[in-house]
Image (spheres, rainbow, N blue to C red):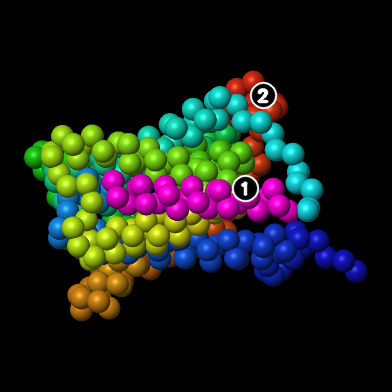
Amino acid sequence: MTTNNQEIADIGLPSAQSRSKVIPFILLIVALLALSVTGILVKFSLIEMSINVTLFNRSWIAALIFGLWNGLYQLRAQKSDTPSIPKQPHHAGDYALLLAASLAYMLGRLLWTWSLTQTSVANANVLGGLSPIFTTLGAWLFFQRIFDRKFLIGMVLAIIGAAILGLDDLLVSQDSLVGDLAALGCAVLYAGTYLILEYLRNNFAVQTILMWRCLVGAYLTLPLILLHQEQFFPASWSGWLAVFGLAVICEALGHGLTVYSLKHFSSTFILIVFLLDPVIAAILAWVLFDESLSLINWLGFTVIIGGIYLAKTGKGSDKQVEVKPSETNSPLPAQNNS
C-alpha cells in the first residue's frame, strides 16, 4: 500500500519534497554565517582605509573571482563529453534587469552605510530589516504569488523579533528622520534586488549574476574614491587580508550561496532568514569580545527563530516556477488572468 506525500504530511512525517530542501536550507544558513562576519572584517578594514576604498577593493577582487569561476565553468563545459542541454537565448530585457538588480543592490548598500551616519544603528537595522514586507508585496503584485496565513504570521514575528533586539537603542526623533528614510529606502532597494534575482536565477548562473553585481559595485565606488582623493588599495598586509576576506568569505561564499538558494526558496523567505544576522552578530560579539546578552536579546532570538519556523512551514517559502522569457515577449513574467 503506497502513501502519497499528502498522506505523509497529514500524519506529521516529512515528505520527499520537504526532505529535498534540507541541504539547500543548510547552505542558506552557511551563507548567513559567512555574511555575519562582514561587520568584523569591515571594522578591521576601516582601520587604514575608508568605506569607499573597502567597497571598491572588495568588489573588484570578487568580480575577478567570479570571472575566473565563470571561465573555468565554460572551459569545463566545452571539454565535457556529455551533451549539454541547449540554453535559451537571453533577451535584452534579461540583461537590463540584471543591470538594474546590480545597481539597486549597490545603491542600497551605499544608502544603508550612509544612514548609519544619520540615525542610530538600531534604527538602521530595524528599518532595513523590513525588506521581507516589500518582497511579499512585490511577489504578490508581479508574480501573483500566494502566501498563506502561517507564512505571513511567521514573517511578522521574525520582524518583531529583530525589532526587539534593538529595542534599547531605538531612537524616535525628527533629527533622525532623514537617516530613517534612507534605511527604509535601502529595504525597498534590497527587496527589488532579490525579487529580480529570483526571476533571473532561472536564466543566469550564480557566477554571472554576481560578476555583474561586483563590476557595477567597482564602477560605482571608483568615482567616490577619485572625488575624495583617497588611496586606491590597502597599504598593509592586514588591509589586504581584510578586503580579501570580504571578497572570498562574504561575496564568493556568502552571496554565492544566497543567489544559489534562490533556485530553491523564495526571495521573501531568504530575507526572513537573514533577520537572524543580528543574532549571529550578537553571539560572535559574546564569544569574541565578551559582550553580555540580556534577557531582551534572548527574547528577540526566540521570536525570530519561531517566526522563521512558521514561515518555512507555511506556503510561500519555496521557489515557484515562473513563466520563461521565451514564452512571452516581455522580460517580466506574464500576468495570470485566469
Q: Tell me the kind of residue under disc 2.
A: Thr
Within 10 Å of disc 2 (Cα), the crowding (few <14, some 14-19, many 20+) is: few
Q: Secondary structure at mark 2?
A: loop
Residue 294 sits in quarter: bottom left
- In which quadrant of the rendered image does the C terminus lie? top right
Q: Position of residue 297 (x, y in %)?
A: 27, 68
Eyeballing the image, is 254 above or below 200?
Answer: below
Is residue 161 in the magenta section? no
Q: Tell me the kind of residue under disc 1.
A: Gln
Which comes before the other along the chain, label 1 or label 2? 1
Query: Residue at horizontal 35%, vertical 47%?
Result: 59
Judging by the rendered image, the residue that carries numbered circle 1 is 74
Q: Residue furthest top?
A: 329
Q: Is residue 255 left or right of residue 6?
A: left
Front residue of this view, candidates 74 and 184: 74
Q: Position of residue 76 (x, y in %)?
A: 65, 53
Eyeballing the image, is 203 above or below 291?
Answer: above
Front residue of this view, candidates 256 and 276: 256
Judging by the rendered image, the residue that carries numbered circle 2 is 328
Residue 281 shows in the view: yes
Q: Which residues are magenta?
A: 56-80
